[in-house]
């Protein structure tokens, strides 16, 4: 029987035959290595597995997955979640500040695996008061690049109904697997509070912002899937160092939709869109069709990693 991994707690996995929510505990005997994989956790939340007598035997191929590197020095990757139907990136401009390059890396990952993504600007109750210009510019930049930006407040309930309908998802009919969404974002942006607001039956632990750094404390340590309002949500702890697998330097721009679109008219191919004559991307930057903020992220990602982790 096929189950979905809903939680990993060291030696045990909790699995459920989604869309039914009936989690049972099981184990892995020996090593299950996915072919060609350098990951530290071969089985991740969201994986579809075959279970016989409480033992996971087979991991089905993933339709997509999101990874992060274990550390800067290591080349090992850690699979955060697999088989996502959608991703919600929760951000705030202040308290805490989400860096835009973090957002762009996450969006790149979603582009690479064709995971529909919504940017959720949370804590609007305080964002509007404390950082009105940043909010306006943020929406201009990301809506301009073709992304959905939804405004929410877990505190006042603003935008929560729309989010709930989206989480329930188009594939949540009883004969489908149930829609699986990833909620991501740095620590303290209100992920757990927002997920709790979506479903009255849930009580995820939420954190208190520490006064000193105004950064959220880590309140979630394991990736875990929850049944939320008819769909399934994976909450993730504050994430640093999102990476992409197998994206070469010359491919980074493929995952910035507005840059990719403009690049069709560059004179040279390949073009890095940094200095070449008659570069259509530089022209679009000059005319304002591509925002300097997004372009800056593109260049940073090119320089930092060459977009490559191996
Ligand atoms: P997480 O680390 O992303 O899961 O963040 P939490 O859900 O633990 O929330 C961090 C802090 O932000 C808590 O003190 C929440 O009460 C607060 N918070 C969450 N959502 C909102 C919101 O919409 N408005 C305001 N003002 N505070 C919020
Ligand atoms: Zn170019």
Image: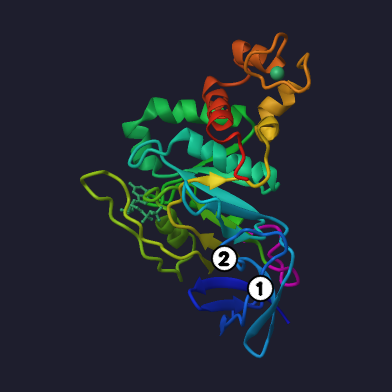
Q: Which residue is mark 1?
A: 32
Residue at the top extreme?
277
- Dot 2: few (<14), some (14–19), or many (≥20) neighbours within 10 Å? some
Query: Foreground: 119 or 60?
Result: 60
Q: Secondary structure at mark 1?
A: loop
On the rendered image, what quadrant is the C terminus found in?
Answer: top right
Q: Which residues are magenta?
A: 168-177
Where is residue 306 shown, x and y percent of the image?
A: 60, 33
Query: Foreground: 106 or 135?
Result: 106
**Residue 133 picture quarter:** top left
Name the residue at 24% across, 50% down. 210
Q: Mark on residue 40?
A: none
Q: Is residue 172 magenta?
A: yes
Magenta highlight: main SS: loop
**Residue 40 picture quarter:** bottom right
> Which circle's residue, 2 or 1, is located before the other in the chain?
1
Q: Which residue is mark 2?
A: 41
Residue 142 can be seen, yes or no: yes
Measured along the vertical axis of the image, is residue 169 above or below residue 121? Answer: below
Where is residue 295 shown, x and y percent of the image?
A: 57, 23
Where is residue 169 shown, x and y percent of the image?
A: 65, 58
């Amino acid at each position: 029987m096929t189950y979905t991994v809903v939680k990993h707690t060291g030696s045990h996995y909790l699995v459920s035959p989604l869309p039914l929510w009936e989690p049972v505990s099981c184990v892995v005997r020996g090593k299950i290595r996915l072919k060609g994989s350098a990951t530290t956790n071969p089985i991740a939340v969201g994986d579809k597995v075959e279970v016989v007598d409480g033992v996971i035997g087979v991991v089905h191929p993933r339709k997509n997955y999101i990874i992060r590197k274990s550390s800067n020095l290591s080349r090992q990757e850690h699979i955060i979640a697999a088989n996502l139907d959608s991703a919600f990136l929760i951000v705030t401009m202040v308290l805490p500040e989400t860096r835009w390059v973090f957002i762009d890396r996450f969006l790149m990952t979603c582009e690479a695996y064709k995971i529909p993504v919504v940017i959720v600007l949370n804590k609007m109750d305080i964002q509007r008061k404390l950082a009105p210009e940043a909010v306006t510019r943020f929406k201009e930049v990301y809506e301009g690049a073709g992304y959905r930006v939804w405004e929410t407040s877990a505190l006042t309930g603003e935008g929560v109904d729309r989010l709930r309908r989206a989480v329930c998802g188009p594939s949540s009919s009883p004969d489908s697997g149930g829609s699986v969404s990833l909620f991501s974002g740095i620590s303290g942006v209100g992920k757990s509070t927002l997920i709790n607001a979506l479903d009255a039956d849930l009580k995820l632990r939420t954190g208190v912002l520490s006064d000193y750094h105004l950064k959220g404390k880590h309140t979630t340590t394991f990736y875990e899937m929850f049944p939320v309002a008819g769909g399934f949500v994976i909450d993730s702890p504050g994430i640093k160092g999102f990476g992409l697998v197998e994206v070469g330097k010359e491919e980074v721009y493929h995952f910035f939709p507005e840059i990719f679109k403009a690049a069709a008219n560059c004179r040279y191919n390949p073009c890095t869109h940094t200095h070449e004559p008659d570069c259509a991307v530089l022209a679009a930057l000059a005319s304002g069709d591509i925002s300097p903020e997004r372009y800056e992220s593109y260049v940073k990602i090119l320089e930092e990693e060459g977009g490559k982790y191996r």
